[in-house]
């Protein structure tokens, strides 16, 4: 072992060296502390706003709150579309004691299918434990009651109420109101394009048809927001702020649900449509298409079984027949007569001889009257009263297709009436140009003759007929048919009370139809009056003994072509090839308050007078009820006055021009 | 006045007899008290966690007190055998160690588990200080080379576990001794050059994937904001959103709503700065500065080269804790698992830390009897 080295230490030198090094180290410490501090300074002071924003966006979330959809009422305040609570059974897995066991017990109690349970458990795996998961989407009232009694046994499971659209009249109103159903991808894309997605963030359903679709923006309202604080797992800790949603506006329609019921009853077992309108405003009083379907089925998502049933029905319940084209048949004769008078091809006294047919010079074809042996000498009144085809064949031939179609277009045939539902068809008002465009064929004179009795390519919708008759009874003043009468807004005032304000919808009038000779209006209207009032006229049977003074016109449209000289017999003809029955009517004759158009498909026997006329009468009987109708307008109380507006506003309605 | 002065002298001597350094104790206690409050806030406002932490602090303080009673020069006798045992234990950890959190750090010795690397935090500076203090200062090159090997052995063994934070602390504790012993600046320059040359080797061979990931994340945390960058981004948001005055005690949304990870342990500084703002941070840093100054004062006033080097190294290593922790949670340094000393929740490192302070106190109070 080596001897230990003797260490001679210079203690003070060592101490000095150490002190110097320690001082340097201390300086290093100070520098590093400054580095730390300046870094924290840059975070907390220089970038404070940036990090504050990021901190807030971490913890604050906006939860959208859906507005309540506006309700829909009929003109007398009867509710037609309502928001009804539906009860769903939801579970917060975190709060349940023993999830698997609780679910199986509650499923046994409420008879919940194993499919639903499976679906539930698969979503349990996907979702956070504190998020609500639906076990059953729609509990019956018994199930709700049963669960409520046993609630204490199932912590973490509860009944959740949500408002869903409900149509108390079901089938009766579907074609007018349409329905609300789940927002699908197409709807979502449309909302996105229109920049409305944000407003629909919490909304589940959207108007798919009818009024619900047309006035979607008014009915929907504006979204509200709940500002909540969440933690890193997304659990809501507390509510910071709440902006309540603005509910959609309520709509009051011009419809009268009682008239609508009568229309349904009158059409029961038939395919067809009824439209009743107030000619003073254009407000639609009743519009019913039979058969119909229940819009409520679609609100919760229709089952494939029900959907197949509706879609595959031979009676085509999905079609709104009141806005689909039918051959107008003789119902257009008053309008053709008016054209003849206006063009001065005829006078009220012009007479023709009707042998039972009409024949074009030099052609073998005979155009037959409905009365085989003819009407004999026929003037304007008789031609309309008796619905004489020969008279109108001759008139149409004289006028030519262009004069006819020009005038008919002025009545609105072949064009949208502008009613506030999107399902409307333009139907067809044939003309030379139309035929060229449609079939690339010239117009034949024979077709003009058919047009003279409302056949050939000509189709009109029952709604167009009511609009045309309205123009007629208003002596050319044209109204836009509409269903919306007023909108009602509920808003909170400063004291927090709800106020309702009603805004009548003002519809702009269309350019009037001005005749050279105004007396022509009354000539035609009187002829329609005689059609109903004279005992031997075609429209008399249906309106015998009414307390009100009605006028009208019948029509029977041939659906299938009948060969020259072939005899038509409804009894032996296939059901879908039988004639259609048509009827137009208005009352009271002096100051019309109601115009009705009826179309019934493939009637078994008889024509418009016997099949469609009684339907029109039932509507009018209901409309006038026990009222004593005099010719004085002052005593007539109008149902329009039932709703008194608090505030007059101009609710603009979007009349979107539809293109096909 | 005079009697008061005598009383003070009397009091001081009582603390001296108990081997307690009052300024150091005050600094430590104030940080501990602060730590309890922040642990309460960061730990979901549970009093349990505060209670557990208080018990640990008590145990650690007792250990500090006991160690303070041992004359510091006597450590020299134990330095070599304990260092050898420590190295053997580190090897044992690598061979039979208990795996926790993806790293092999724990040794199961029947009735308890412990981390030999923690003991090395104290033994390495003792060993190096003992070795260097045998000769005259400034330290010679040959001595430095031996000292480096003494430092490198435990450092590499711990880095292999892998525990980058601890190996960093141990390496720096040894290097501080060499620096304070007066290693020439030329040598320091060469070493710095070698260290930077060593970095790629470290990256390629010694670092595990998760450590590389941490470095990558440090370089660009926004690259993967929901994955590996999440911790550091949320921490910076917490600190930054605290602003000048902070959001208020228990009002820090980042911590209370659990956006911040490891709130009561490694990221407790973020909780503190969110709730107390820049003003709070300044006060906290001043307290740390005070402790460091006191430690260095003790070192400078120590009577023996060994105690000087040991005290200096322990103090500077303590500061490395502070710097690495705050640097990492505020985005200056990559995330390595180093707690904020005396404040973070946790037992093992707290005991080691206070044992170190016990040594500082011993050096401060025993010196008169060794002159």
Image (cartoon, rainbow, N blue to C red):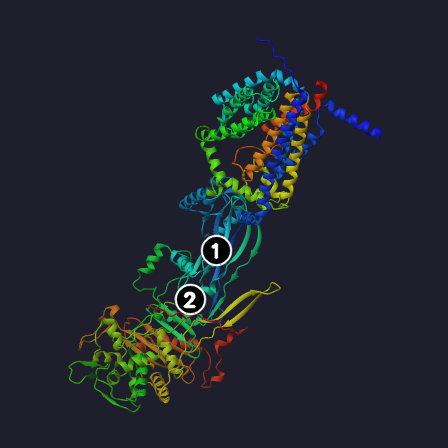
Q: Chain of mark 1?
A: A
Label 2: how many Cα within 10 Å (few below 14, some 14–19, many 20+):
many
Picture coordinates of residue B19, whole percent (x, y): 71, 23
Which sits earlier in the primary sequence, circle 1 or circle 2? 1
The residue indicated by pointer 2 is A214
- Chain of the residue under the numbered disc 2 shown in the image: A
Q: Which residue is rendered at x = 68% and y = 28% of the image?
A: B297
The residue wearing badge 1 is A202
Kind of element beneath mark 2: helix
Measured along the vertical axis of the image, is residue B193 above or below residue A396? above
- In percent of width and height, residue A655 lies at 41, 71
Within 10 Å of the Cα at label 1, are there few (<14), some (14-19), or many (20+) other Cα atoms? some
- Residue positioned 79% across, 25% down in the render: B10
Disc sitting over residue B84 in the figure: none
Residue furthest top in the image: A1
Q: CA distance from mark 1 to mark 2?
A: 21 Å
Q: How far across and down, in percent of the image, does residue B133 sit? A: 61, 19
* The quadrant where residue B28 appears: top right
Residue A18 or A304: which is nearer the viewer?
A: A18
């Amino acid at each position: 072992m080596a001897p230990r080295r003797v260490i001679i230490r210079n203690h003070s030198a060592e101490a000095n060296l150490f002190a110097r090094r320690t001082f340097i180290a201390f300086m290093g410490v100070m520098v590093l502390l400054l580095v730390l501090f300046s870094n924290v300074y840059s975070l907390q002071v220089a970038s404070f706003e940036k990090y504050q924003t990021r901190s807030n966006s971490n913890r604050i979330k906006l939860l959208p709150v859906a507005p309540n959809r506006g309700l829909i009422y009929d003109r007398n305040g009867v509710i037609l579309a309502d928001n009804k609570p539906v009860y769903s059974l939801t579970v917060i897995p975190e709060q349940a004691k023993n999830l698997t066991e609780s679910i199986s017990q509650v499923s046994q109690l409420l008879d919940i299918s194993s499919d639903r349970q499976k679906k539930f458990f698969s979503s349990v795996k996907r979702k956070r434990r504190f998020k609500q998961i639906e076990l059953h989407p729609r509990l019956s009232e018994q199930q709700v009651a049963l669960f409520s009694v046993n609630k204490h046994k199932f912590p973490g499971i509860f009944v959740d109420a949500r408002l869903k659209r409900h149509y108390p009249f079901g089938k009766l109103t579907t074609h007018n109101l349409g329905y609300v159903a789940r927002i699908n991808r197409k709807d979502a894309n449309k909302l996105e394009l229109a920049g409305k997605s944000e407003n629909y963030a919490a909304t589940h359903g959207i108007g798919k048809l009818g009024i619900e679709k047309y006035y979607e923006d008014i009915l929907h309202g504006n979204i509200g927001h709940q500002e909540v604080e969440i933690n890193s797992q997304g659990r809501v800790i507390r509510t910071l702020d709440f902006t309540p949603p603005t509910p959609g506006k309520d709509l009051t329609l011009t419809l009268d649900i009682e008239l609508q019921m009568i229309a349904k009853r009158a059409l029961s077992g038939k395919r067809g449509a009824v439209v009743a309108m107030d000619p003073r405003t254009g407000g639609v009083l009743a519009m019913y298409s039979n058969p119909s379907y229940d819009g409520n089925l679609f609100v919760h998502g229709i089952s494939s079984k029900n959907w197949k049933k509706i879609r595959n029905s031979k009676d085509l319940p999905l079609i709104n027949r009141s806005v689909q084209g039918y051959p107008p048949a003789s119902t257009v004769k008053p309008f053709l007569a008016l054209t003849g008078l206006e063009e001065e091809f005829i006078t009220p006294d012009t007479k023709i001889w009707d042998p039972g047919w009409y024949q074009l010079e030099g052609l073998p074809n005979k155009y037959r009257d409905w009365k085989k042996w003819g009407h004999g000498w026929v003037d304007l009144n008789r031609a309309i009263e008796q619905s004489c085809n020969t008279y109108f064949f001759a008139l149409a031939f004289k006028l030519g297709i262009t004069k006819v179609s020009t005038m008919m277009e002025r009545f609105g045939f072949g064009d949208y009436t502008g009613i506030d539902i999107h399902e409307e068809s333009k139907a067809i008002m044939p003309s030379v140009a139309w035929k060229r465009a449609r079939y690339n064929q010239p117009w034949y004179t024979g077709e003009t003759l058919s047009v003279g009795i409302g056949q050939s390519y000509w189709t009109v919708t029952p709604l167009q007929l009511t609009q045309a008759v309205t123009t007629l009874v208003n002596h050319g003043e044209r109204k836009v048919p509409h269903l919306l009468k007023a909108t009602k807004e509920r808003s909170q005032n400063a004291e927090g009370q709800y106020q309702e304000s009603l805004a009548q919808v003002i519809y702009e009038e269309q350019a009037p139809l001005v005749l050279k000779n105004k007396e022509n209006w009354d000539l035609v209207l009187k002829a329609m009056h005689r059609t109903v009032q004279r005992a031997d006229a075609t429209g008399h049977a249906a309106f015998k003994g009414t307390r009100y003074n009605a006028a009208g016109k019948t029509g029977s449209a041939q659906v299938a072509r009948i060969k020259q000289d072939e005899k038509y017999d409804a009894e032996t003809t296939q059901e879908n090839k039988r004639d259609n029955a048509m009827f137009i009517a208005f009352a009271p004759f002096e100051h019309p308050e109601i115009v009705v158009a009826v179309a019934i498909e493939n009637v078994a026997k008889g024509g418009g007078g016997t099949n469609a006329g009684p339907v029109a009468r039932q509507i009018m009987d209901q409309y006038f009820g026990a009222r004593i109708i005099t010719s004085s307008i002052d005593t007539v109380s109008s149902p329009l006055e039932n709703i008194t507006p608090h505030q007059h506003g101009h609710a603009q309605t979007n009349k979107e021009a539809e293109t096909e | 006045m005079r009697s008061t002065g005598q009383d003070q002298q009397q009091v001081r001597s009582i603390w001296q007899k108990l081997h307690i350094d009052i300024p150091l104790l005050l600094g430590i206690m104030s940080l501990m008290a602060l730590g309890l409050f922040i642990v309460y806030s960061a730990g979901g406002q549970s009093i349990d966690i505060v209670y557990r932490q208080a018990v640990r602090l008590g145990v650690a303080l007792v250990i500090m007190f006991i160690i303070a009673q041992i004359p510091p020069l006597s450590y020299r006798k134990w330095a070599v055998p304990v260092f050898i045992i420590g190295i053997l234990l580190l090897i044992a950890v690598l061979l039979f160690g208990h795996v926790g959190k993806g790293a092999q750090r724990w040794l199961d010795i029947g009735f308890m588990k412990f981390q030999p690397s923690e003991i090395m935090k104290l033994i390495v500076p003792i060993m190096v200080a003992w070795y260097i203090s045998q000769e005259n200062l400034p330290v010679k090159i040959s001595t430095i080379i031996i000292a480096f090997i003494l430092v490198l052995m435990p450092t590499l063994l711990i880095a292999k576990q892998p525990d980058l934070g601890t190996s960093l602390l141990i390496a720096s504790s040894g290097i501080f001794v060499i620096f304070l012993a007066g290693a020439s600046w030329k040598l320091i320059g060469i070493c710095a050059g070698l260290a930077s040359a060593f970095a790629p080797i470290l990256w390629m061979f010694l670092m595990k994937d998760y450590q590389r990931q941490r470095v990558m994340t440090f370089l660009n945390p926004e690259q993967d904001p929901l994955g590996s960058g999440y911790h550091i981004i949320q921490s910076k948001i917490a600190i930054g959103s605290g602003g000048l005055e902070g959001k208020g005690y228990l009002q820090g949304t980042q911590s209370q709503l659990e956006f911040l990870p490891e709130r009561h342990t490694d990221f407790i500084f973020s909780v503190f700065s969110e709730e107390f703002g820049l003003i709070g941070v300044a006060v906290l840093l001043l307290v740390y500065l005070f402790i460091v100054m006191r430690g260095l004062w003790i070192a400078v006033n120590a009577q023996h080269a060994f105690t000087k080097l040991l005290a200096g190294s322990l103090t500077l290593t303590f500061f490395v804790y502070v710097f690495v922790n705050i640097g990492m949670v505020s985005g200056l340094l990559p995330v390595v698992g180093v707690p904020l000393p005396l404040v973070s929740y946790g037992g093992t490192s707290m005991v080691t830390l206070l044992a170190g302070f016990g040594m500082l106190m011993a050096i401060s109070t025993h010196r008169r009897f060794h002159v």
